[in-house]
Amino acid sequence: MRTDGEHTVVELEQQMGYLRRVRGTGQHAQLIGGEVTLLGPDAHAAALGVMQRHGRKPMSMTHGDFDYDYLKRLALDGEGQRGFEFLRFAGHFDSLMLGRRGTPRPRRESELHAHRRRFVELFEQLRREHGVRFDLAHNMTVTPRNLDQVAEVTREAMRMGFGMLSFQPAAYVGNPARWREEFSDVSIDAVWREIECGVGARLPWRHLQTGDVRCNRTAYGILAAGRWTPLLDDEDPKDLAARDLFLDAVGGTDFDRPPGLLALALARLLIRHPTLPGRAVGWAARLARRAGPLALLRGHPRGMTFVVHAFMDAAVVRPAWEAMQRGEVAEDPDVRAAQERLSACSYAMAHPEDDRLVPACVQHSVLDPEENIRLAQQLPMA
Ligand code: SF4
């Protein structure tokens, strides 16, 4: 089917409006659906504009196979002025993908390092020439075929300029023609061990959990002088107390706001939680000690997050979702586990037409096949 910018913008307007109503503002949202750069740069920019207007922080999901000219036309307006101050992109690179320009059939992850580097360089050039800042994530699907290369990708990519490295163990979801391997051999633990091997450090995650532990795992830290240090030491009671206070005080506060409003929000925070500055100073001193003061001063410190997100197989998602729609708790333990995970889902998609948010697992396992047929009728090849 063809890619239609107008259709994308109209649908986004409704989806973002719905998200705003049910979830408020100040959160991230992914612009996702096939390859986002199949949209022309103007339509892509318009889509990001809609998302921003509705208070989202958009992230464009791409395979990263585009040129500087595309990025420039996306980021700048007709007069060559910045249309965006800040861009967030997630580039998906792995050796399971075919058809990339220059490396259409990669056999090893290492063959893609030059593409990963080039992707970051495009944004560095844009920042240098036009002052557009960026935040980049690296995505990679993991199967038994490339599991043993996760450590190497981590080691290389964490120094390229990405702010997040995210790995997704493959699941039996989407197009069955792509299910060429035994995916179930790749567990979230196995992927995490490989990432730790690449980072050269333990990645603590249990103390900051989003959603269900069977779905997500995240480690937040800083990279300074090539060494990664977690923001919080999960074995230090003082850090855990600081976490509790911070979450209690700050909760879902969005600090990404104009200076005046930010000052107001901070002032309100300090009045309500006067012990916060003291705790923050103590936490920062401990972090500096762990990371090394010299590394922080001279090692170009920056945020570096590691994520594993494990989708579920369509075989359990469909019965789990259908039972949930009927208000039933499944008896089958695997289906019940899927229900628990769907109930705690942290990766939902907006369906304003049905007045509901739908977990991405359900979207891909249950809804995509029907919606794709409808879209193929609505948007036939031009
Ligand atoms: S989409 Fe939701 S339910 Fe599915 S794996 Fe991700 S967080 Fe879990």
Image (cartoon, rainbow, N blue to C red):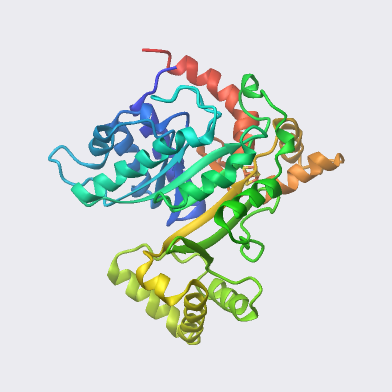
Furthest-left residue in view? 79
Of residues 87 and 228, the one drawn nearer to the viewer in this rendering = 228
Q: How many marks?
A: 0
Of residues 216 and 354, the one drawn nearer to the viewer in this rendering = 216
Q: Residue at x 24, y 33 (%)?
A: 69
In the rendering, at what x and y percent does residue 21 appear?
A: 47, 50
Q: Is residue 375 above or below residue 15?
A: above
- In the figure, residue 179 lies in which quadrant? top right
Q: Is residue 141 above or below residue 40?
A: below
In the rendering, at what x and y percent does residue 35 appear?
A: 43, 29
- In the figure, residue 42 lies in which quadrant? top left
In the rendering, at what x and y percent does residue 360 appear?
A: 59, 39
Q: Is residue 167 left or right of residue 131?
A: right
Q: Residue at x 48, y 37 (%)?
A: 92
- Locate the C terminus by quadrant: top left
In the rendering, at what x and y percent does residue 85 appear?
A: 26, 52
Q: Is residue 65 left or right of residue 313?
A: left
Quarter, ligand 1:
top right
Furthest-right residue in view? 331
Question: Is residue 359 visible from the viewing direction of this image?
Answer: no
Question: Is residue 223 visible from the viewing direction of this image?
Answer: yes
- Locate the N terminus by quadrant: top left
Of residues 197 and 316, the one drawn nearer to the viewer in this rendering = 197
Of residues 145 and 165, the one drawn nearer to the viewer in this rendering = 145
Q: Is residue 337 left or right of residue 9?
A: right
